[in-house]
Amino acid sequence: MTTEISVIIPVFNESGNIAPLAARLEEVLLKMAANWEVIWVDDGSTDGSYGEIKTVLRPNSSAIRFSRNFGQTAALAAGIAAAKGLWTITLDADLQNDPLDIPKMFGRAVEGFDVVSGWRKKRNDSFFMRVLPSAAANAIISRVTGVRLHDYGCTLKIYRTNLLKDLDLYGEMHRFLPAILGYGGASITEMEVSHHPRAAGRSKYGLMRTFKVLLDLFTVKFMGDFITKPIYLFGGLSFSLGLLSACLAGYTLYNKIVCHIFVKDQPLFLVAIFLALVGVQMAFLGLLAELIIRSYHNSAKKPFYRVKETIDRDPV
């Protein structure tokens, strides 16, 4: 029998939340007309969370335990690798996501969307420590990637599983999954979901996580826009620096001829030389990046495109 839904729950020190979450989730899933499985991924918990996971396992659920804490991206990657469902639902273990939102999100997904992203419009978190930094990060990510979502940080999302299977996740890339899939042409929508106050345990997020997100954004932007043509990025920088260098050198020459200011008295000439050298380096970096990218694609044997649909009509 085909499994339609795989629910992946990354867990890190969520003792006290496992049993009530399992009960609520099972109650919701049993009411859905779909075959499902639940995959618990213990990300090196030290508070007895894994023991609680083992007590809530059912015949249609499984558990994966890491040897230490590797991070939420690694936990989701392990769950995705084990998922058998046509659709993958990711859910936090802290009870702040509400399983009751799953049926309406799943209904939206089967209408034809590849990704349904949760939007915690009314968040029960500290405004200055969580809500405000998150809003700023979401605005920047939406602007840079072009995939506009109000809440990239909400773990409650539904994905078409075959799209996730093709991805190599690392670092903190899990929060950028909609943007990464969007670069590949996935259809994405957003739905408002409930958000509850944390009942037990402590939050694993802080202001430092926001800075990490912004740093990872550079990688996502490069992988999305320039992974097959890095020379466009480095060549563009090289051309810009070269043009600026030429303008500064021309201004220096103008001062020398018209204003009779010696070159040695014009620091902009040194700046022009510096920019010219950096521009040349950028050009060669672009060429090296082209060679590396081509070698990567040749060795990976994976296409850099995604076919959404194929129609093969039999000859008449």
Image: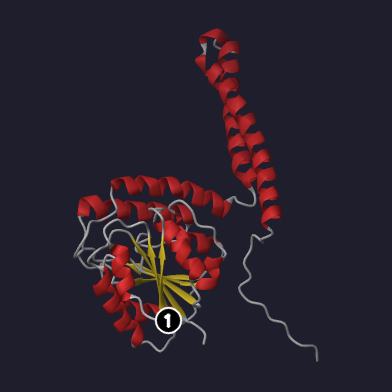
Q: Is residue 255 visible?
A: yes
Secondary structure of the residue carrying numbered label 1 = strand
Residue 158 occupies quadrant? bottom left
Q: Pointer 1: what residue?
A: 36
Residue 201 occupies quadrant? bottom left
Coordinates of residue 266 in the picture (x, y in percent)? 52, 13
Picture layout, residue 164 above or below residue 209: below
Residue 30 occupies quadrant? bottom left
Judge by depth and name the residue closer to the eye, 271 or 15: 15
> What residue is at 70 percent from the left and 48 percent from the top?
295
Please tell me how many numbered marks the rendered image carries: 1
Judge by depth and name the residue closer to the eye, 255 or 305: 305
Does residue 295 appear left or right of residue 116 in this picture? right
Identity of the residue furthest to the bottom in this view: 316
**Looking at the rendering, in which quadrant would you find the C terminus?**
bottom right
Coordinates of residue 7 in the picture (x, y in percent)? 40, 73
What kind of colouring is applied to the model shown? secondary structure
> What residue is at 64 percent from the left and 52 percent from the top?
228
Q: Is residue 178 visible?
A: no
Coordinates of residue 289 in the picture (x, y in percent)? 64, 42
